[in-house]
Amino acid sequence: MKKTIYFLVILLALTLSACQSKGPSTELNVEMTDFAFTPNHFMIPAGKEITVNIAHHGSVVHEFIIMKLGTNAGDSFDEDDQPNVYELIKVPPGHSQSFTFTAPSEPGDYQVVGGIVGHLQSGMTATLTVVQ
Ligand SMILES: [Cu+2]
């Protein structure tokens, strides 16, 4: 009997943690390294205030740029991409900081990139899915 209860408790814990990682969240935890975002897919609810907790483990400045819906930075982020920026967060190396922004009101997949020269090409890219 004890074993059954133990098993059920573990099962419940696994189910709860699985649900949490799948649904949209108003709190994003992002790890920055040279040169990646971990995780590289996020899901947030449209129009809500979002908190981004960034843990920067890299050795150079990194950015977390959310591109406007329907746009992407292409092969590299440059001057032409500036008007398509929805939100830009810049983090110096060794800093772990929290930021807030308002989620876009339109559902869809938004591209996230590192905007510093060479970072996008090196793998700093992610997808932000906005759901209604
Ligand atoms: Cu970067």
Image: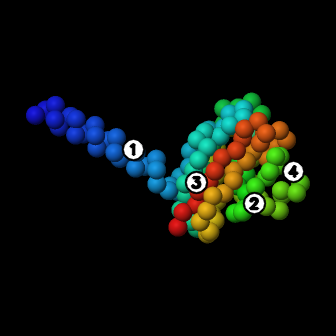
Q: Which residue is mark 1?
A: 17
Q: Which residue is mark 2?
A: 71
Q: CA distance from mark 1 to mark 4?
A: 39 Å
Q: CA distance from mark 2 to mark 1?
A: 33 Å
Q: In the visual, does 111 lie left or right of 132?
A: right
Of labels 2 and 4, the one closer to you: 2
* N-terminal label among 2 and 3: 3
Of labels 1 and 3, the one closer to you: 1
Amino acid type of the residue tagged 1 in the rendering:
Ser
* N-terminal label among 1 and 4: 1
Q: CA distance from mark 2 to mark 4?
A: 13 Å
Q: Residue at x 72, y 41 (%)?
A: 124
Q: Which residue is mark 4?
A: 78
Q: Residue furthest left?
A: 1
Q: CA distance from mark 4 to mark 3?
A: 26 Å
Tell me the element at label 3. strand
Are there few (<14), some (14-19), or many (20+) residues within 10 Å of tag 3? some
Amino acid type of the residue tagged 2 in the rendering:
Thr
